[in-house]
Image (cartoon, helix red, strand yellow):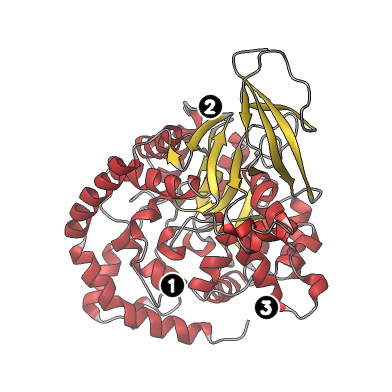
Amino acid sequence: MTDSMIVLRGGLILDAADRNAGHGDILIDGGVIREVGPLGMAVPEGTPMRDVSGHIVIPGLVNAHTHGHGSFGKGRGDLWSLELLLNAGPWISAKRSHEDKYLATLLNAADMTRRGCTAVYDLTWEQPRPSVEGMHQVAAAYDTIGMRALISPMMADLSFFDIVPGLADSLPDDLRKTVDAWRLDPYQASIDACREVLATWPFDTDKLRFGIAPTIPMHCTDEFLTACAELSDEFQCPVQTHMAESKLQSLVGQERYGKTLTAHFDDLGLLTERFTSGHGVWLDGDDMRRMADRGASVAHNPASNMRLGSGLAAVREMREAGVNVGLGSDGSNSSDNQNMFEATRLAAYVSRVLTHDLRRWVSSSEALEMATLGGARSMGFERLIGRIAPGYKADLAFLDLHDLAYVPLNDPFNQLVYADDGASVVHVMIDGDFVYEDRTFKTIDIERVIADVEVAMERLNRDTADRKEIVAALEPHVADHCICFSSRPY
């Protein structure tokens, strides 16, 4: 027996990989699951014991797509499409200090943790470009709370107003001059910054990793995308982009490249086993086949896809093509919360809106598998997390069996996905340590975090008031133009 051992006795253990649920014991050693066995299984003498018999034990949920900086933007927009959200970006994410980046990420991480999420793919944003210090602040926030994270800064060298045909020319002169001043810098500074971050990354890569996120294909010149592909090859780092999220994006891509966005990325060498397509709402059959052939993933974000009116992703077709699918909450500035229970439920529901053929619906166990192993694969963590099995990290969530979502207990998989909204989460363990215990954060002072956020937002609201007015003036022009453009057939 080692000092780092603990045995969890009597939990109802759920394994989405084989839709198996049964009471058993889990032996953990050094933050890693050593054995999963029947009730009362033998363990080394003197091993500390924790009674979890009143709990469902699941692998920690994995958020395959979110934006940590977005926690400061929750509730900013109501009738916003994706394009109106992009229009608002220079306001809602502006003037952030390094401390703001840390604080926004920490707030986002807390929202995930309290709902059983233990790992996250964070497409963060730093204006005007990524910096070593800024990325370290984001990583430090996850390190503080104890979450596992893949941090990938969004980057672009073309602005939103550069890429929508005719949009800039449709603006009044004063607004046109304003958006001209918001043009982005050449891409090389962003590539150089990411290369430095990758070459000097000081964090444990079993816990915190760094990738890159050319934010939206058309927002990046081909030279920039080629540089991203080369950087990914050089460091073997993951890449995620917002691929075919909205109809407008897909239309613009077809017009610009004469092919789909996915085909263009494939031609540039970006479609690899390290690549994740964020959203993928407008992927066609050839796109899916390309992604499957390359071992790429999709991060399905059903809540924001509906919130922003982007569409309903064809997840059954993706999975049948052989594409790995993970689930994401998306950022709180576009999807309002970080609740992976909600994302899991909506992933199942969306499949049922698309067809009356129930054989093509996503089942509860499939939805849970996407929310665990699917996300882990997209992050490159599939050998570390996503299952309760020997050799996997002890990243676990413990759900109260007496929560009304499970009374009476008829089918734990169905009730977890369809009845539980995350309120049942009592404890969360990462690397064998409780980071959330008895519904209390163990690694952060959440009241201090809330107070610090309120102070920061008072300053940011004051400092960005002028940008808020500009965004409001731009909004009707952007909405009218993009609605008209998106009415074209695709």
- Which residue appears at 40% of the width and 40% of the height? 138
Quarter of the image containing the C terminus?
bottom right
Contact flag, marks 2 and 1 (Cβ < 8 Å)? no
Q: Residue 437: x and y, percent?
A: 49, 37
Residue 478, by quadrant, is bottom left
Residue beneath label 3, please? 353
Q: What residue type is labelled 2?
A: Asp
SS type, badge 1: helix
Residue beneath label 1, please? 83
SS type, badge 2: loop
Q: Residue 291: x and y, percent?
A: 72, 57
Residue 173, by quadrant, is bottom left
Q: In this view, does 77 lie to the left or right of 356?
A: left
Q: Residues within 10 Å of mark 3 (few under 14, many from 20)?
A: few
Nearer the observer, disc 2 or disc 1? 2
Q: What residue type is labelled 1?
A: Glu
Residue beneath label 2, please? 204
Q: Is residue 111 left or right of residue 271?
A: left
- Which residue appears at 70% of the width and 32% of the height? 392
Q: Distance between the residues labelled 3 and 1?
A: 24 Å
- Which residue appears at 69% of the width and 58% of the height? 367
